[in-house]
Image (tube, helix red, strand yellow):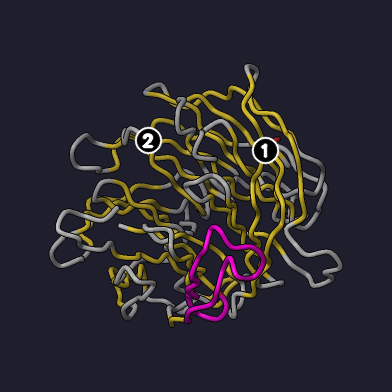
Amino acid sequence: MNEPGGRQPDLFVGTYTERLPHVDGQAPGIMRAHYSGRGELGDATLATVFRNPSWVTAFEGVLYAVSETRSDGGEGDVSAYRIDPDSHTLVLLGMQPSGGADPAHLAVSPDGRYLAAANYSGGSVALFGLQDGTGRIGERLAVVKHEGEGADPQRQEGPHPHMVAFDPSRPELFVPDLGLDAVVVYGFGPEGLKESGRIGLPPGTGPRHLAFHPSGDVFFLVGELDNSLRTFRRTESGFVPVGSVSLLPEGTDAASTAAAVRVHSSGELVFASNRGHDSISVFRFGPGAALELIANVPVRGQAPRDIVLTPDERHLLAANQDSSSVTVFSLDPQATGENTLVYVREYWVPTPVCLAWA
C-alpha cells in the first residue's frame, strides 16, 4: 500500500459525533493521523466535518463514508471524498441518500464499479454505481428491504443488515443480517441486486461482520450476540459451515459482544475484537479449516470496535470507541500465546469506530 517514493499511508478514522443511545460521540467528523511505518501514529486531526461517519473505506484515492443518521425521510447518507495526495485533505465529490436509516457499513466492489451500503435500522441494502475515473457516487441502482425477525426480542425485533462484503472473485455481495440470523447473498450488476442464496445460522447468533481468507474460498463470520467465530468453505452449491469456536476464553462470565474480524495475508491468523471483555482474540487457522485460539489480549481500552493490520502487517491497531483511543500492538506471526500481540502504546482519538488506510 505504500506509494512510490516510500510515502506511508494515512490512517482515516470513522467516528461518532453525537450522543446516541449506544454511544457518547465526541468527534467533530472524520479524523486522520499520519503513519510513520514503525507502529507510530501522528496526532489525530480533523479531515472533514461529517455527521456520525461511523464507517469509512478507501479505494484508489477516494474515501467513502456513511453518515449513520436518519433524515425526515428515514434515510442516512453516503459520501465520497477525493484524498488530496499533497495536503492529505478530503475534497467532497458528492453525497447520496443511503436508502435507509442508520447506514452502518459500506464497501466498494473489487473492480471499483459499485458501492454497497448496509442500512442497519432501515433493514435494507443499497447498491450504487460509481463513475469511472472519478469515483463519484452515481445512480442508486437498487434498494432491497429485508423482512423477518430473530430470536432475541431486544436485538432481533427486525432485520438489521450490519455489513456488506463483496466476494473477491465472483460478482456476489454477502450481507450479514444481525436481526435475521442469516447471511443474505446477492448477485449484482447494472440491473441492481438479486438474492441468490441465504446462509442460515443458529438462533441468537447475531451475524455482524465477515472477512474472506486470501484464497477467496473461505470466510470467517463473527456472531455479535453469541460471541462466536464461524468458518465457511466454498462448494459447488455455495458456502457451507465447517466449524465454530467461542471468541472468549473458557470460563469467561463478563458480558461481551463481538465486533470486527480481520485475516492476515498469510491466511494463518484470524483476529476478532470483543466489547465488554475488551480484548482481541487471536486464532491460528490450520489444516482442515480448524481454528485454534492462541491468544486473548486486553486492548487497554473500552469497547474495541474495529481492528486493522498495518500495511506491512507488523502491527495491529484497535479502535476503542468508549475510551477514545487507538491501541497499537506489535505482531509476530510466528509467536504463540500472548507474545503474538504485544502492547506498544495508546493514542488519543475521539470516539473511534472504524480504521482505514489510504
x and y, in percent, of residue 267 in the image: 54, 44
x and y, in percent, of residue 190 in the image: 37, 23
Mark carried by residue 287: 1
Q: Secondary structure at mark 2?
A: loop
Question: Which region of the structure is painted magenta?
Answer: 322-345
Q: Amino acid at mark 2?
A: Pro
Is residue 147 rendered to the left or right of residue 67? right
Vertical relation: 333 (above or below) 345: above
Is residue 187 rendered to the left or right of residue 66? right
Of 171 and 250, nearer the camera is 250
Residue 37: say if magenta: no
Residue drawn where x is 74% and y is 50% of the image: 156
Residue 323: say if magenta: yes
x and y, in percent, of residue 68 in the image: 48, 59
The quadrant of the rendering that contains the C terminus is bottom left
Q: Amino acid at mark 1?
A: Pro
Q: CA distance from mark 1 to mark 2?
A: 28 Å
Is residue 343 rendered to the left or right of residue 192? right
The mark closer to the camera, 1 or 2, is: 1
Residue drawn where x is 62% and y is 66% of the image: 280
On the image, which quarter does residue 236 sit in? top right
Of 47 and 232, nearer the camera is 232
Of 228 and 79, nearer the camera is 228
Vertical relation: 138 (above or below) 195: below
Residue drawn where x is 71% and y is 63% of the image: 257
Residue drawn where x is 31% and y is 70% of the image: 35
Vertical relation: 344 (above or below) 284: below
Which residue of the protein is positioned furthest toward the top in this rendering?
236
Q: Earlier in the sequence, mark 1 or mark 2?
A: 2
Pointer 2 residue? 110
